[in-house]
Amino acid sequence: MQICREKYIMSKKSNMDNNKIQQEILNLKKNILNLNFQKYSGQLEKTSQIKNAKKEIARLKTKLSKNSGDKNA
């Protein structure tokens, strides 16, 4: 079920333009900052959320560079 949900989210994000992708990356970075504060204050129970957010940023950056590459070609 988790894999299907991730594929749905990625297909939804495949329609995003570069500005929306950059905004989503910024939101995820803010989220990571909050998660790190929670982690070090002992409030975060699921530390895997940090790892998942970092992976999502990497996916979006890859998509952003792919979109930029397509426009330059």
Image (tube, rainbow, N blue to C red):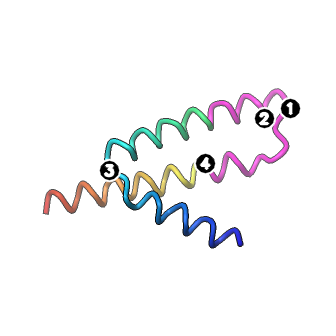
Q: Which residue is mark 4?
A: 53
Secondary structure type for disc 1:
loop
Residue at 72%, 28% in the rendered image: 37
Is residue 65 depicted above or below 19 in this figure?
below
Find the magenta span and give its range. 32-53
**Quadrant assignment, res 6:** bottom right
**Quadrant assignment, res 44:** top right
For this view, does 11 lie left or right of residue 20?
Answer: right
Q: Earlier in the sequence, mark 3 or mark 2?
A: 3
Q: Which residue is mark 3?
A: 17
**Is 34 within the magenta?**
yes
Q: Position of residue 67 (x, y in %)?
A: 28, 58
Say few, some or many: other residues with alpha carbon within 10 Å of mark 4 (under 14 / 14 to 19 / 20 or more). Answer: some
Which sits in the foreground, 14 or 28?
14
**Labels 1 and 2 touching (C-beta < 8 A):** yes
Q: Which residue is mark 1?
A: 42
For this view, does 57 lie left or right of residue 44?
Answer: left
Q: Earlier in the sequence, mark 4 or mark 2?
A: 2
Is residue 45 depicted above or below 65 in this figure?
above
**Labels 4 and 2 touching (C-beta < 8 A):** no
Secondary structure type for disc 3:
loop
Q: Nearer the viewer, mark 3 or mark 4?
A: 3
**Quadrant assignment, res 22:** top left
Say few, some or many: other residues with alpha carbon within 10 Å of mark 3 (under 14 / 14 to 19 / 20 or more). Answer: few
Q: Which residue is mark 2?
A: 39
Q: Position of residue 71 (x, y in %)?
A: 17, 58
Which sits in the foreground, 41 or 70?
70
Q: Amino acid at mark 1?
A: Gly
